[in-house]
Image: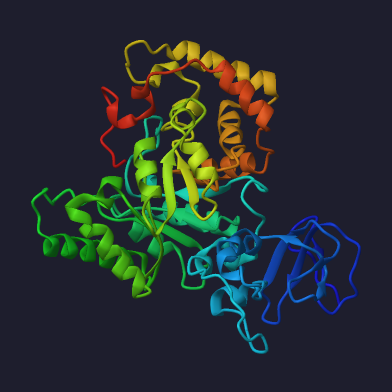
Amino acid sequence: MSTESPLPGYRETRLIDPFEVFIGPIFESGAKGERRFALRIDERHVNRRGSLHGGMLMTFADATLGAAAADLADGGVAVTLNMQSHFLAGPDLTGFPGAVTPNLPYAASLPASQWGIVPMRGQRPAELVLGSVQLGLAYGAANRTGKPSHDAAMALVRRAVDAGITTIDTARAYGDSEQRLGAALSAADRTRIVTKLSPLSELDETASSATVERAVDASIEASLAALRRTHLDGLLLHRARHLTGWNGAVWKRLREWQARGVITALGASIQTPAELHTALGFSGVVHVQLPFNLLDWRWREAGAIAALEGRGDVTVHVRSVFLQGLLAANDPQIWPAIPGLDPHRLTATLRDGVASLGRESCADLCLAYVRGQPWVDGVVIGMETVRQLETNLRLCACAPLTAVECARIEAMIPRVREMLLNPALWPARLEAAQ
């Protein structure tokens, strides 16, 4: 008996059904209610054991199985990871002596395993990630409402989860953001929380390894307590320089926590292309967050985008899509006083881009541009109100820009000084965590 499709356009298929000549989006239901979502790109497929099954699927598993290619050079069997239970508990290899499967410790925390397998990077627009700095601090140059009340924060988080947002970004340094998230999310929620280590501002360069380890431990334990969890889905360094600081003591300690099973994914919050190149050289970095918007030329020119496109194992979230709200506000009066900057020209150019591409607003244009980048997996947007959330949800339901449209916008936008792209360098900026 067919189950109603949970997503428009997805067709149910079951292993016991006769093979259908059907190419397109499909889903399967497991015995415990888990579901696999995939894009069938082939009517039939023969695996390495010579067995025929119903089509090649473009899924998260297909993207990661390539990591085990070296192990399969001797002609061994690659076991396809199909259902959610495979990611969480591992596939049953009974009857497959010598079979191998790639090590996927990160998969258990991904939306792929929680909500069904998703298509490969570049085959889907970037997801909307709820940024929660505004829940704990009055943050952002265009923030006119300030920090929301406790009840307003609870309502915002609950509405985000109900709307299907699966990932929330936070940090130890974001005031009481973690505490509010812990209060708003129940144990039954499947929402993935990515938090950040304390900036460790209290430590000087001469701190001993033991002192650094205690500070790292205190930050992790505080995050676990505030979030009311026993496990962290993702933990990023708030300062990328801590990858190498104190002779690597911070990163070594984080890897120890990960080995104990407390942390699933490790990574770093990045500020510059140079930091990104350094981070990608570290084993264990599988998640990076970096600032990017339609004004930001740095990543292309430094070869950072090319580096990310070659690392399909690294999840990339971008922030500053609206540059602290400046790009979406369409108000030249709130821009920082930077020499050589003409806010009136920039806002006029943005309006021209909106009109020429038929977008509804500057916010729509900015978001569609970033979501049109094939190397971006998630877009972190901070919000203070449910109304802002509803707007961003609606904009994310719109089609992203095509590659041709992205190129048109890049040709229209004047080159800005690097100082504008980093709010920490603004002459008169709000005091808030970066």
Question: What is the quadrant of residue 228 in the picture?
Answer: bottom left
The image shows residue 293 at horizontal and vertical percentages of 49, 31
The image shows residue 183 at horizontal and vertical percentages of 39, 64
Query: Which residue is the extreme one toward the bottom?
Result: 95
Colour scheme of this structure image? rainbow
Q: Toward the viewer: 216 or 178?
A: 216
Q: Toward the viewer: 280 or 199?
A: 280
Question: What is the quadrant of residue 355 in the picture?
Answer: top right
In the rendered structure, the answer to whether residue 5 lies left or right of residue 18 reads left
Give the residue at x 74% y 61%: 57
Against 150, is 19 above or below?
below
Residue 147 seen anywhere in this rendered image of the structure? no
The image shows residue 400 at horizontal and vertical percentages of 65, 37
The image shows residue 128 at horizontal and vertical percentages of 55, 47
Quadrant of the image for the N terminus? bottom right
In the rendered structure, the answer to whether residue 99 lies left or right of residue 213 reads right
Give the residue at x 65% y 75%: 79
Give the residue at x 88% y 60%: 22
Quadrant of the image for the C terminus? top left
Q: Toward the viewer: 246 or 123?
A: 246
In the rendered structure, the answer to whether residue 65 lies left or right of residue 11 reads left
